[in-house]
Image (cartoon, grey):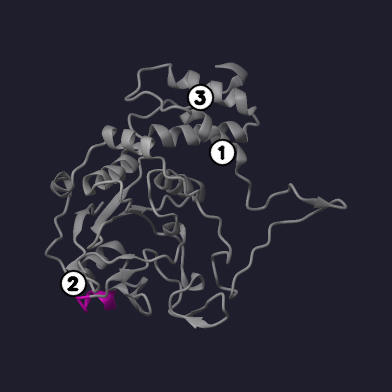
Amino acid sequence: MSMGVKLHDFPLHGIHHHIFLLANYCKKRNIQELKAKQLIYDKFHQSEQRRPLQPNEVEQAVETAYRKKSSYSLSQKREGKVNLPRFSKTTDGGLWNNEMPMPPDVFDYSFTKRAIQSAPWSLVDMFEDSPLKLTGCETGEIISMLFEPDELVCCGTVNNFETLTTREWSSRGAIAEQIVPNSMRARLGINKSNKESVRCRDTIGLRKFLVVESDKEELSMDDKASVLRYLRDELDAKLKMVVHSGSESLHGWYKSSGNNLIDWELMRLACKLGADKRMWLPEQLARSPNAIRSKNNKKQVCLYFDPL
């Protein structure tokens, strides 16, 4: 390969994710954008792949990678001085910026239908494929499989929340219908209105899970399950749990990669497939597994759970 660049071979699964990784690698090597696209195309066609490239798949991945700015951009300069982007938080201990960019909200129906066709997964098949069947478990028991015993977890309803350790929740059994999918760094924090709050960005610890909520009315429940499978297989994302909302959506819980760029790419692609972009926010609520939805008294069934 020219220019002394040796790109890693494509894996059996996770083609889209691998393209994005190659694009970032080329960017770090200061390879021109057009050349990066050609190098990735050449690498893809060096061997037989599980599927063909989607239209503009390489172009979009490279353009996304090359347009990303570092959190400490050096692009703005005045009188020879570098102006770093402003990072603001409500308390000294906070981990998250008060202002967070959101993934683009661009549902692509035709792309989604192709994704569904490439990764079909009915609700029945999802449940059969689940490594553990947890429909009979209490919510607290499931939470204890997601978080460490001393991790702080926030559960409740829209206007009434409580933060307890996993051990404390597991002893309760029945738990309220909503949960923050990331552990908390504190039981109480300061929100952006400068008021004390149990659930606000200031109380959130490191990202632990990314929840993809698939709820587009154009898609059937089996289609929504297929979207979650597509993300799992295409990005090699670790699908930990799927919860039926008790209404018209599925919540797919993916383990955070620990890398913000990789997590962003998962959510960006999920939004293209019809997911709710607000789930990117670390304090955003998800549906508690096997809890009862108060609006209709239906169980939010845990359909899929992978303990590994």
Which residue is found at the position 25% from the left and 63% from the top?
145
Marks 1 and 2, Cα distance to the nearest angstrom?
45 Å
Instruction: Using residue 175 as the reference point, say whether residue 12 is left or right of it.
Output: right
| Segment colored magenta | 167-174
x, y percent for residue 146: 29, 62
x, y percent for residue 114: 33, 33
| Neighbourhood count class around disc 1 (C-alpha, 10 Å): few under 14, some 14–19, many 20 upward | many
> Residue 151 or 15: which is nearer the viewer?
15
Please report contact status of discs 1 and 3: CB closer than 8 Å, yes or no: no
Rendered-image quadrant of the N terminus: top right
Q: Residue furthest right?
A: 79
Which residue is found at the position 51% from the left and 47% from the top?
261
Q: Secondary structure at mark 3?
A: helix
Which residue is found at the position 56% from the left and 38% from the top?
65
Instruction: Using residue 99 as the reference point, say whether residue 184 is left or right of it.
Output: left
Can the viewer see residue 6? no
Please report contact status of discs 2 and 3: CB closer than 8 Å, yes or no: no
Q: Residue furthest bottom?
A: 196
x, y percent for residue 122: 18, 44
228 within the magenta span: no
Residue beneath disc 1 = 65
Total number of numbered discs in the rendering = 3
272 vs 100: above or below: above
169 within the magenta span: yes
Can the viewer see residue 145? yes
What is the number of the mark on residue 40?
3
Residue beneath disc 2 = 297
Which residue is found at the position 28% from the left and 56% from the top?
249
Mark before the other along the chain sequence, 2 or 3: 3
What is the number of the mark on residue 24?
none
Marks 1 and 3, Cα distance to the nearest angstrom?
13 Å
Amino acid type shown at disc 2: Asn
